[in-house]
Amino acid sequence: MIIHALPEAKIEIRRTRKPRITPVYRFPSVSVFLPFNPNINPKNKLILSLSHVSRRMEQELKIKYPGEMSQIVIQKFKSIMLRLNFNTHKKSIAIFLSPVFEKIYYLNFDLEEKVIVGESLQITDLVFSKKPSQKFHLLVLGERESRIYSEDSSSFLRISANGFLPEKTFFVDSNSNSGKYLKRVCNSLNKISCSNWVPVFVLGAEKILGAFKSICENNKAIIEYIPGDFDGFPAVDLRAFVRRRASDWQQIREKRLSQKLRQAVTNNKLIEGYDKVQHELMAGSGQVLLMERQLLNRHLSDDTFKERMKNRYSRFSCIKNSTDEMIEKILECGGDLELVSDGFLKEYGKIALIINTIK
């Protein structure tokens, strides 16, 4: 019997290569917004505020992003604290920081103190952290004396005293002493209100207000004339009265901005529309940038826009798109930024730029 040997089985050996596990690094980012006015606050007080912010930031980083990346950010922030300019005349600072990016802005407007710890830097966070202004000037008109006060968040100061009438009776005739007195008051108010964007309230007897309106009709800063007898009111009561009266500060602010926009158009100092504003800012020109909220919100929520922009801007930067870039340019120009209600800039293309201070 012949036995045939079976053919030798071929064994195929395949070696599978396991994918190498690479460490995933999470890049924490920190945005710090802080009031910073060395002209008002002593250096040791500012350093104390920075130290307080540093501790808050460090605690949150260690909870959300434990590890070496957080330590890098903490050390970079401490280094920035040592390099800050305490000779600046600005009002606030904004610091954007990550292991691979850092940027400091010195700003001409007030910011709410805030620390944001996350994985993406957004310059729009700065815009939304701008402290709403409730400053105003108050003129109290009397038959014999006027008083002008300036209000901000921390003080209410008398800044000017004008005129005195020997007569006890008020005369409307502009050639009389009362007319000259009211003209002096108007001139003083014009000098004060033309140097800033602060709204003005005028209080006084109805007859005096009528005469003053005819003399000072061109002062666009005057928001409201309030009739009444305020001669004996102390400053603290005047301040409280106007604050109760002016409850909608957003409306008051936008009324003042509307006046400034019309004045800018008259003086040929207004740039309108997205492309024209962008071109002007890229050239380094600009005093006040105004934009509607929907312009920012669209860029924050529009995925198509984000996809189109992602290769043009670094994902580690606080600048993510062309609108962010315009915001940065107005800050670098030392200008101001005003975020307004949707529809407010409808006739200006939702965005406008005042290119210099209007007197």
Image (cartoon, rainbow, N blue to C red):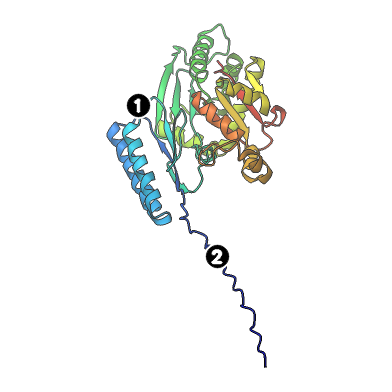
Which quadrant of the view contains residue 291?
top right
- The reply to whether residue 170 is in sight is yes
Q: Residues within 10 Å of mark 1 (few under 14, many from 20)?
A: few
Q: Residue furthest bottom?
A: 1
Q: Residue furthest top?
A: 175
Q: Residues within 10 Å of mark 2 (few under 14, many from 20)?
A: few
Mark number, residue 267: none
Which quadrant of the view contains residue 283?
top right
Give the residue at mark 1.
39
106 or 142: which is nearer to us?
106
Q: Is residue 59 above or below residue 79?
A: below
Residue 72: percent from left, percent from top = 37, 45
Give the residue at mark 2.
16
Q: Image quadrant for the C terminus?
A: top right
Residue 352: percent from left, percent from top = 64, 26
Q: What amino acid is found at the position of numbered circle 2 in the picture?
A: Thr
Q: Residue furthest right?
A: 347
